[in-house]
């Protein structure tokens, strides 16, 4: 028996596994092509599944791959007509006199189901090729799916043509598009954030766009990439009147470093934030939040007395803030460690 997934069944929002479809095994084992049983446990309103393969009981995750779930629908999986339709559509994309990017867009506009998904995927893949130059013309396409695929492919591409197109979007009246372009440039463009400052006349708005753009850098590029990006933003936007934006960026950088276990580096940045933060605190909670971050870092390094001193200052000077409550809890934890 071949094992298949029926999407959208059960009313619970997740895929409902179907047992044997009675067909011959025509796929590789990693795609579900193996003999099996289904083990289903109903526990009140919850239903739990497991795939029992001869010699093993596998978690439901083996059939919980979203990409796989799209292509294993029974009505099209082994349908020769569907395969022919996809092949014809793919041939049309590559034979388009306008080139494959515009060809894929045209196919996607006029197709449904698997063929539309295939055409949009082709557009995405072409972002890494010389055909990327055709993607900017589709960013505002009337077909929302085509526009989204073109923009996503453009932002994911590191090719010079894509970077130039992303820089051009920085000055767009569409703030969401400008922000997404800046985020892509923060990861891939050595001219970031200088390009942001040059493209956006409003200095404060430019600083906000640049500071927001670096938020996703750690996730996609790692902590080192984040530190590099934050340093560049702070160098390009050094004006004290922008500290309400740039110092919060540094605070988030320190929190990320602390989460990565890099306590010493986090403390250096927190101390810089505390040194530069205006008095009175423009944001009301930047200083107390920074003090809490410092106390947590000192505690993590085993510098108990210093951490307690910072917690005490927090409670004395900023007792009305939530940071002071967290500091009190940290103090109790630290003082409790000394008790036998």
Image (tube, rainbow, N blue to C red):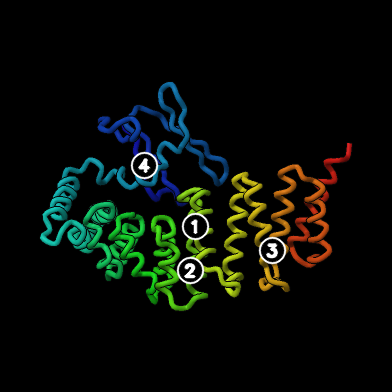
Query: Which is closer to the viewer, label 1 or label 2?
Result: 1
The answer to whether the residues at label 3 and label 4 have Cβ atoms under 8 Å apart is no
In the image, taking residue 108 as reference, residue 62 lies left or right, namely right
Q: CA distance from mark 3 to mark 2?
A: 24 Å
The answer to whether the residues at label 4 and label 1 have Cβ atoms under 8 Å apart is no
Is the N terminus in the top left, top right, bottom left or bottom right quadrant? top left
Query: Which is closer to the viewer, label 3 or label 4?
Result: 3
Query: Which is closer to the viewer, label 3 or label 2?
Result: 3
Q: What residue sits 33% from the left and 54% below the top?
A: 158
- Numbered mark located on residue 5 in the image: 4
- Numbered mark located on residue 209 in the image: 2
Q: Tell me the element at label 4.
A: strand
Is the C terminus in the top left, top right, bottom left or bottom right quadrant? top right
Q: Can residue 77 be seen in the rendering of this structure?
A: yes
The residue carrying pointer 4 sits among few (fewer than 14), some (14 to 19) or many (20 or more) residues within 10 Å by Cα, namely many
Q: Tell me the element at label 3.
A: helix
Q: Which residue does the numbered mark 3 point to in the structure image?
A: 275
Q: Is residue 195 above or below residue 83?
A: below
Q: CA distance from mark 1 to mark 3?
A: 21 Å
Q: What residue sits 33% from the left and 35% below the top?
A: 31
Quadrant position of residue 168: bottom left
Q: Return the disc, 4 or 1, that comes first in the chain's sequence.
A: 4
The answer to whether the residues at label 3 and label 2 have Cβ atoms under 8 Å apart is no
Q: Return the disc, 1 or 2, that comes first in the chain's sequence.
A: 2
Q: CA distance from mark 1 to mark 2?
A: 13 Å
The residue carrying pointer 2 sits among few (fewer than 14), some (14 to 19) or many (20 or more) residues within 10 Å by Cα, namely many
Q: Return the disc, 3 or 2, that comes first in the chain's sequence.
A: 2
- Numbered mark located on residue 229 in the image: 1
Q: CA distance from mark 3 to mark 4?
A: 58 Å
């Amino acid at each position: 028996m071949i094992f298949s997934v029926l999407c959208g069944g059960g009313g619970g929002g997740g895929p409902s596994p179907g047992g044997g479809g009675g067909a011959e095994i025509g796929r590789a084992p990693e795609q579900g092509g193996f003999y099996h049983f289904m083990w289903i446990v109903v526990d009140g309103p919850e239903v739990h599944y497991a795939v029992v393969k001869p010699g093993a009981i596998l978690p439901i995750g083996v059939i919980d791959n979203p990409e796989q779930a799209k292509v294993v629908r029974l009505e099209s999986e082994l349908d020769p007509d569907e395969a022919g339709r996809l092949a014809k559509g793919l041939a049309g994309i590559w034979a388009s006199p306008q080139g494959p990017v515009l060809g894929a867009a045209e196919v996607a506009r006029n197709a449904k189901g698997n063929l539309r998904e295939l055409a949009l995927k082709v557009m995405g893949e072409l972002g890494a090729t010389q055909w990327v130059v055709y993607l900017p013309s589709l960013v505002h396409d009337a077909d929302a799916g085509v526009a989204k695929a073109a923009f996503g492919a453009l932002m994911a591409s590191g090719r010079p043509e894509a970077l130039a197109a992303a820089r051009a979007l920085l000055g767009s009246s569409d703030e969401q598009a400008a922000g997404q372009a800046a985020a892509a440039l923060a990861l891939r463009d050595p001219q970031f954030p200088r390009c942001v400052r040059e493209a956006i006349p409003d200095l404060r708005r430019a600083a906000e766009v640049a500071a927001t753009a670096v938020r996703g850098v750690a996730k996609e590029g790692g902590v080192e990439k984040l530190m590099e990006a934050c340093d560049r933003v702070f160098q390009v936007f050094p004006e004290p009147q922008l500290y309400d934006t740039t110092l919060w960026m540094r605070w988030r950088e320190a929190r990320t470093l602390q989460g990565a276990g890099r306590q010493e580096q986090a403390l250096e940045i927190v101390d810089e934030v505390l040194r530069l933060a205006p008095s009175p605190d423009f944001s009301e909670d930047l200083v107390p939040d920074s003090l809490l971050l410092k106390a947590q870092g000192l505690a993590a390094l085993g510098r108990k007395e210093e951490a307690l001193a910072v917690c005490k200052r927090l409670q004395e000077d900023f007792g009305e803030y939530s940071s002071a409550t967290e500091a009190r809890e940290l103090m109790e934890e630290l003082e409790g460690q000394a008790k036998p």
